[in-house]
Image (cartoon, coloured by chain):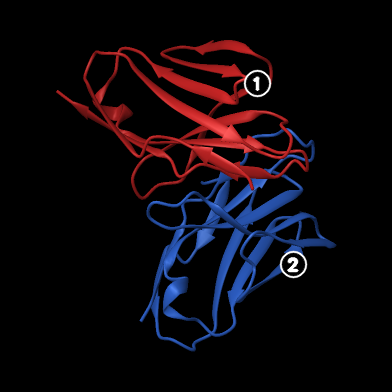
Chain colours: A blue, B red
Amino acid sequence: DADVTQTPRNRITKTGKRIMLECSQTKGHDRMYWYRQDPGLGLRLIYYSFDVKDINKGEISDGYSVSRQAQAKFSLSLESAIPNQTALYFCATSGSRDVQPQHFGDGTRLSIL
Amino acid sequence: GQNIDQPTEMTATEGAIVQINCTYQTSGFNGLFWYQQHAGEAPTFLSYNVLDGLEEKGRFSSFLSRSKGYSYLLLKELQMKDSASYLCAVLDSNYQLIWGAGTKLIIKP
C-alpha cells in the first residue's frame, strides 16, 4: 500500500461545485502539505500543517481551504470551483525536523469545466 | 523575489552522461533538493545538498556551490527509464521549499 494516499485520483466537475480532495498517510509524519502543479510552472504550495492544531497558508491559498482531521489526514477543499483551478494536486508529508525530504502522494488530476 | 532557474528540456542518448543545471536566488539557504518526476506520477526524492561539493549516489551525483547559487545533477550511463522531469528545490531561510519548474529529460536510443 502507498504511504501517502490521495483520493480521488481523477475528478471532473463543473464551475461552482464544492470539491474535497483527501490525503491520508501511514508514515507517521507530523507535517503535511498541499501543492498544485501546472504545466511549465513549479510546484506551488497551497497550505501546510506542522501538526493537528497548526494550519498555514502557502503561496496560493485564495479559493482553497484545508482541514487537518488527524495526524494522518489532511483534506483540501475548493468551496466554489473555477476553471483556473484545473491542475494536478499533490499531497506531501515530511518528518518534524526542518530538513527532511517530502514524500508525495500519486496526485489528483482535477478538471473544472 | 525568490527564483530558481532550470532548463525547460534536455535531450540525451542512452548510455551517455547528462548534466542538469539549477541556479537559485532565494532569501536564505538551508539546502537544495533534487527530485525525479515521471510523467503523471509523484515526485520522488533523489538528493539533498547543504555543503559545497559533490555527493555521489550510484549513477546519480549532485553538486552544490553556495557562493555561486548553483547546483547540478549529473546522470551517468543513461537508461531509457531516466526519461523524466528533474525538479530542483531550495529550502529558504524560513525552511520553506521553493521549487523550480523542472527540466524534462528525453532519452533517445
Give me the residue at 70% from left, 45% from top: B96
Quarter of the view holding residue A38: bottom left
Q: Chain of mark 1?
A: B
Quarter of the view holding residue B106: top left
Q: Closer to the observer: label 2 or label 1?
A: 1
The disc at residue A69 is: 2
**Above or below, A111 relative to A46:** below
In the rendered image, the residue lying farthest to the bottom is A16
Quarter of the image for the C terminus of chain B: give it: top left
Q: Are marks 2 and 1 in contact (CB under 8 Å)?
A: no
Q: Nearer the viewer, residue B28 or A53?
A: B28
Left or right of B71 in this view: A99: right
Q: Are marks 2 and 1 on the same chain?
A: no
In the rendered image, the residue lying farthest to the right is A53
The residue under label 2 is which amino acid type? Gln
Quarter of the view holding residue A94: top right
Q: Position of residue A4 (x, y in %)?
A: 57, 49
| Label 2: how many Cα within 10 Å (few below 14, some 14–19, many 20+) | few
Give me the residue at 73% from left, 39% from top: A95
Q: Nearer the viewer, residue A18 or B102?
A: B102
Left or right of A103 in this view: B22: left
Q: Which residue is mark 1?
A: B66
Q: Chain of mark 2?
A: A
Give me the residue at 68% from left, 22% from top: B50
**Above or below, A109 relative to B3:** below
